[in-house]
Image: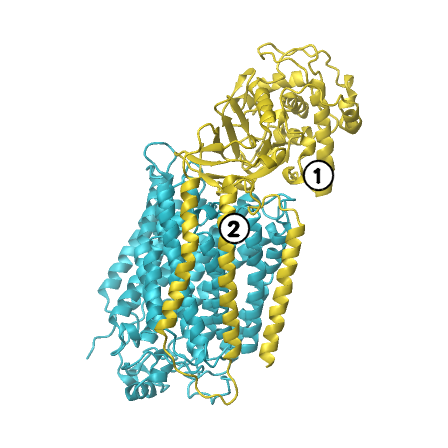
């Protein structure tokens, strides 16, 4: 095993003493600590969304059950989707972006550390804003896709949809700010020698995701602003009254965002797996350039397939043909990724660590989601599949089998780098196998219930429709997830306190982040490394090893090394608070708009006038 | 060694599990399967599906077998040196780019062909049906015949039917899985889908669903499709074109409506109980129907004069005696037009939805259809419902009730159309179907949308008044 006991390091993983206490977390601008905040917050929301899913499955376990009312069920499925996409998977990816991108490219922090903190706080407040209503049964209830005109005031008069529109606008601010930050970081802050084609694959996928975010989020922002104006100020973008409004405008705008969003959700996991598989196979990633190009191709094609969500809408044969064919095309680069991962493992020396199992799990399970995706790329075939449980099965294989498996692999892989300690492998494997069983038992039967005619988004179904068995199976599988998650959470917290000390490179990995101590010092790299290859620790030159030797030394503070670090500051939090308060004003009391705006502008002004870091000598 | 054993064992378990799933799924009835097409469109789609499934399965098996092979074969062994540090292989990568591309061509070509065939204009001479999606029910109009109905379609087999889809409010999606694909019903737009039911499926019932989320009761927006012979269809149309059968005095006009049975929660909520109650209630309704048949169609302008006001005059209509009354009733007496025999409807098309707990109807009440007509005509009902033959009932918000007595279900497929369910439905529709637009009408009932109790000032109806309306509606064959 790779986890043989090591002598305890000179410092405890909790060193760097000034970094403790609540205030230090509220005012931090350190990308690693912000990454950790993202990780904890997103894991919380992941479990929150999971509880929603379990209630959904309990209701559907047998026909004609009324565990929850139709109204509450509709809130549950809406919030399950919204939570998992915007509050769990995207921020889990963001946790890795934050923690890893500067470490992988040899930078001391992200380009805009305070903007980075701002992104997190906006995400946290926005997440709370959109989640609180379900505790009072007034949560958004028109689906995560919020089709107009159902979402307009005429058909959704309550405040439910207000929370959704405003919540997503807030979260969009967070995503966009973060995306510009990471783009700038990756373009400008790479260490000497870290050419684009030497970047670790995770950073590459992160780079592509930021481009997708920057291009896709403005579209949904516009769509949401239209809806906001329709709901609050009586405009007529989506209303049914035939005064020029077109409900399909919403669908186009939403899916122009919505399909790239799928790749925003899955590409970070692809990146993580592209780090995990080579490490535990002891082989470089197979076909690195092709992996980069296929990622780029997926992103480009991802903007040309949106209407495959609308094959039943009746766009006409030309549009259906175009979007059917582009959707099929996108399978090719995706397939290349799968094959290259398998080829990475082939002829390797595979260690079955938990991270590796999750990586293999991604390859095995995402393949199923990819194949069912091709099945509804064919528009006529999709007429029998869309809006059925077959689709639910498909995208859970993509988002759970793809994103979540990759993210769990990433957590097990990078936990030692984040905390300085190893997670327990035995518990990790129990977690993995429980997850695989739960995932397949829950989602595989949905292929059948869907093809046997079960529509999506129904709070109940009648007996005798031929769906009982498959729904019972799905529900049984869903009940295993909480057990798996309990094992994971227990492992996570116990290992954080008492796990084996990891050392700088417990897995024998090859990339830059493994050259520095675990957890990394606040300045990351004592000496900014010079890079000569894709895997500096595997196939580097003398200069790589020399940098690695210097950077692996522990116990030095930034003052010892004369490295200037940015000041901690509470101002990004205050700006975020002002922003969210301002939005709250639309729902609760208009006076809040003024209060929030004042707080935001004042804090922002003060932020801009205060220096980022002490003056350089 | 140990590892590979474990994998082999796991693989065999998985195989057995897959077989079990396959076996069970073959034995169970699947009344809404998309894999059992009965129309030209359904077969086109099924052809594509078969091809997709074939290629998909081949790719799946290949990828997973290679993956499992690689993962087992290249596991770390004792005393193993570092593995070869290969970085890629242009030949291999070109191969696994081109092979999927070639497979996709075999999918794309028939796909494009089917797109253009299925989205061409429907053949001339097709049966047009104008479908209007409402929250949460379906309105079906046969413009060539002047027939309007709700939540139930009759289709002649062998003739292409062209659905013209419009929405009255939000976006819905029209879908009968056994007959063909779905098509969204989009606000401010007319959509089309057409197919030709096979001649082999005459005398069948199919379930239909709304497939696009449309609000609180999206799950309760179902419909039924009856595929019948052309002769039966013509007969049905003839019957539907007539105004309401019951509306004025006739020599044999019914004097007594059905008695809404005493409905007890547990007795009806369990599937079995629901079934028996359903059948009994259906039988009762059937008995009444046969008694009322033969009434001439007369305009409803004159108030109906009941021949007997005594509810005891016709004790045979009591639910308790329903079974015997069915037996005693003359079989198959002259029907106004063909109606799919409800006793031949398979179980999957009969709703089993439970009645909400706490919703009760006074047992033993006898309805009077003539009083019901008057009550209906002087109540808010006419604001939303039309009944041809009753000039006061002109509303268009709710389903057309001209021949409501001939329908299989009420509440868009959520409940069977029997006196028992109809009474509860009129009493408190909003408790029976979440957020339905039809208001709660029963006196002292709690309206879950308005969150108030219905009073006589707000037009609340007593159980007796509801029983009368039920008697009236049930007579509308």
1 and 2 marks on the same chain = no
- Label 1 to label 2: alpha-carbon separation: 29 Å
Chain bearing mark 2: A
In this picture, residue B40 sits left or right of residue A565: right
State whether residue A306 is above or below residue B176.
below
**Which one is in front in this view, the residue at disc 1 or the one at disc 2?**
1
Image quadrant assignment for residue B447: top right
The 10 Å Cα crowd at callout 2, few under 14, some 14 to 19, many 20 or more, is many
Tell me which chain the residue with mark 1 is part of: B
Q: Tell me: A29 left or right of B202.
A: left
| Chain rendered yellow | B
Circle 2: element type: helix
Q: Colour of chain A?
A: cyan
Residue A457 vertical placement versus B370 (above, below) = below
Q: Position of residue A192 (x, y in %)?
A: 24, 78
Badge 2 is on which residue?
A: A76
Q: Residue at x 71, y 30 (%)?
A: B281
Task: Give the residue pinned by disc 1.
Answer: B274
- What is the quadrant of residue B168 in the picture? top left
Residue at 58% of width from left, 13% of height from top?
Answer: B300
The quarter of the image holding the C terminus of chain A is bottom left
Q: Nearer the viewer, residue B358 or B7?
A: B7
């Amino acid at each position: 095993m790779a986890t043989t006991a090591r002598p305890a390091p000179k410092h405890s993983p909790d060193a760097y003493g000034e970094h403790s206490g609540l205030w230090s977390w509220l005012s931090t601008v350190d990308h690693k600590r912000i990454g950790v905040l993202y990780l904890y917050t997103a894991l919380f929301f992941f479990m929150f969304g999971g509880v929603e899913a379990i209630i959904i499955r309990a209701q559907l376990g047998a026909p004609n059950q009324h565990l929850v009312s139709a109204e509450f069920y509709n809130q549950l499925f809406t919030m399950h989707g919204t939570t998992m996409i915007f509050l769990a998977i995207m921020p889990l990816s963001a946790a890795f972006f934050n923690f890893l991108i500067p470490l992988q490219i040899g930078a001391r922090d992200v380009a805009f550390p305070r903007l980075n903190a701002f992104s997190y706080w906006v995400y946290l407040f926005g997440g709370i804003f959109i989640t609180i209503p379900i505790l009072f049964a007034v949560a958004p209830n028109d689906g995560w896709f919020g089709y107009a005109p159902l979402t307009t005031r005429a058909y959704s008069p309550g405040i439910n949809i207000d929370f959704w529109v405003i919540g997503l606008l807030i979260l969009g601010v967070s995503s966009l700010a973060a995306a510009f930050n990471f783009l700038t970081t990756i373009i400008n802050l790479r260490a000497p020698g870290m050419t684009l084609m030497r970047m670790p694959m995770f950073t590459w996928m992160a780079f592509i995701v930021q481009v997708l975010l920057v291009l896709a989020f403005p579209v949904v922002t516009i769509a949401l602003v239209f809806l906001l104006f329709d709901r609050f100020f009586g405009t007529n973008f989506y209303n049914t009254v035939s005064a020029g409004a077109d409900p399909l405008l919403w669908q186009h705008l939403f899916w122009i965002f919505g399909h790239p969003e799928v790749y925003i959700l899955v590409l970070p996991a692809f990146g993580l797996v592209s780090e995990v598989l080579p490490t535990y196979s002891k082989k470089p990633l197979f076909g690195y350039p092709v992996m980069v190009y296929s990622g780029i191709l997926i992103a480009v094609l991802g903007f040309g397939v949106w209407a495959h969500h609308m094959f039943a809408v009746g766009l006409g044969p030309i549009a259906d043909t175009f979007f059917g064919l582009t959707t099929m095309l996108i399978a090719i680069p995706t397939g290349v990724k799968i094959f290259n991962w398998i080829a990475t493992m082939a002829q390797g020396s595979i260690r079955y660590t938990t991270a590796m199992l999750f990586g293999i799990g991604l390859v095995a399970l995402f393949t199923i989601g990819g194949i069912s995706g091709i099945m509804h790329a064919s528009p006529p075939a999709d007429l029998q599949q869309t809006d059925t449980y077959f689709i639910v099965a498909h995208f859970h294989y993509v988002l759970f089998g793809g994103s979540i498996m990759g993210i769990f692999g990433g957590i097990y892989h990078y936990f030692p780098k984040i905390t300085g300690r190893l997670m327990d492998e035995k518990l990790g494997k129990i977690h993995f196998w429980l997850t695989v069983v739960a995932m397949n038992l829950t989602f595989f039967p949905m292929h059948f219930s869907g093809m046997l005619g079960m529509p999506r988004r129904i709070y109940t179904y009648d007996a005798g429709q031929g769906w009982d068995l498959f729904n019972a199976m799905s529900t049984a599988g869903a009940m295993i997830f909480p057990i798996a998650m309990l094992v994971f959470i227990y492992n996570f917290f116990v290992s954080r306190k008492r796990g084996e000390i990891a050392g700088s490179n417990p897995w024998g990995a090859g990339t830059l982040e493994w050259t520095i101590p675990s957890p990394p010092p606040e300045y990351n790299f004592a000496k900014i490394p010079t890079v000569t290859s894709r895997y500096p620790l595997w196939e580097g030159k003398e200069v790589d090893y020399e940098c690695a030797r210097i950077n692996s030394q522990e116990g030095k503070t930034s003052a010892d090394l004369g490295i200037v670090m940015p000041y901690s500051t509470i101002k990004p939090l205050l700006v975020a608070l002002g922003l969210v308060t301002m939005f709250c004003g639309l729902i609760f009391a208009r006076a809040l708009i003024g209060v929030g705006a004042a707080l935001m502008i004042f804090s922002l002004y003060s932020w801009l006038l205060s220096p980022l870091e002490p003056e350089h000598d | 060694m140990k590892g590979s054993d474990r994998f082999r064992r796991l693989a065999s378990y998985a195989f057995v599990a897959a077989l079990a799933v396959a076996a069970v799924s073959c034995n169970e009835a699947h009344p809404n399967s998309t894999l059992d097409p009965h129309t030209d469109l359904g077969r086109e789609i099924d052809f594509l599906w078969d091809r997709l499934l074939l290629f998909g399965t081949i790719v799946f098996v290949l990828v997973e077998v290679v993956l499992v092979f690689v993962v087992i074969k290249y596991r770390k062994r004792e005393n193993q040196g570092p593995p070869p540090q290969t970085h890629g292989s242009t030949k291999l990568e070109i191969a696994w780019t081109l092979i999927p591309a070639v497979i996709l061509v075999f999918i794309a070509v028939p796909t494009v062909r089917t797109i253009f065939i299925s989205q061409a204009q429907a053949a001339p001479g097709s049966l047009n049906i104008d479908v209007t999606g409402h929250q949460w029910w379906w309105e079906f109009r046969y413009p060539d015949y002047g027939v309007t109905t709700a939540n139930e379609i009759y289709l002649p087999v062998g003739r292409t039917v062209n659905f013209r889809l419009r929405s009255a409010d939000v976006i819905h999606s029209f879908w009968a899985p056994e007959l063909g694909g779905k098509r969204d019903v989009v606000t401010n737009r007319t959509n089309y889908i057409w197919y030709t039911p096979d001649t082999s499926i005459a005398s069948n019932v199919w379930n239909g669903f709304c497939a696009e989320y449309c609000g609180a009761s999206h799950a309760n927006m179902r419909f039924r499709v009856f595929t019948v012979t052309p002769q039966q269809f013509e007969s049905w149309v003839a019957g539907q074109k007539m105004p309401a059968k019951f509306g004025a005095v006739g020599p044999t006009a019914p004097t007594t409506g059905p008695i809404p049975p005493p409905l007890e929660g547990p007795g009806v909520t369990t599937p079995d109980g629901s079934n028996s109650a359903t059948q009994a209630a259906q039988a009762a309704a059937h008995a009444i129907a046969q008694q009322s048949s033969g009434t001439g169609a007369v305009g409803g302008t004159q108030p109906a004069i009941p021949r007997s006001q005594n509810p005891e005059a016709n004790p045979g209509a009591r639910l308790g005696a329903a079974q015997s009354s069915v037996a005693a009733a003359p079989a198959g007496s002259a029907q106004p037009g063909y109606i799919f025999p409800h006793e031949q409807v398979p179980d999957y098309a009969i709703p089993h939805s439970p009645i909400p707990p706490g919703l009760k109807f006074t047992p033993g009440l006898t309805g009077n259809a003539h009083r019901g007509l008057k009550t209906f005509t002087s109540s808010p009902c006419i604001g939303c419902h039309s009944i041809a033959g009753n000039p006061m009932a002109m509303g268009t918000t709710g389903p057309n009730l001209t021949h409501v007595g001939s329908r299989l279900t009420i509440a868009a497929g959520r409940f069977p159309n029997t006196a028992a369910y109809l009474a509860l439905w009129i009493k408190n529709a909003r408790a029976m179907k979440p957020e339905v637009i039809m208001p709660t009408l029963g006196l002292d009932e709690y309206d879950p949308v308005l969150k108030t109790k219905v009073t006589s000032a707000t037009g609340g109806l007593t159980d007796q008044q509801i029983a009368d309306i039920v008697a009236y509606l049930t007579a509308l064959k």
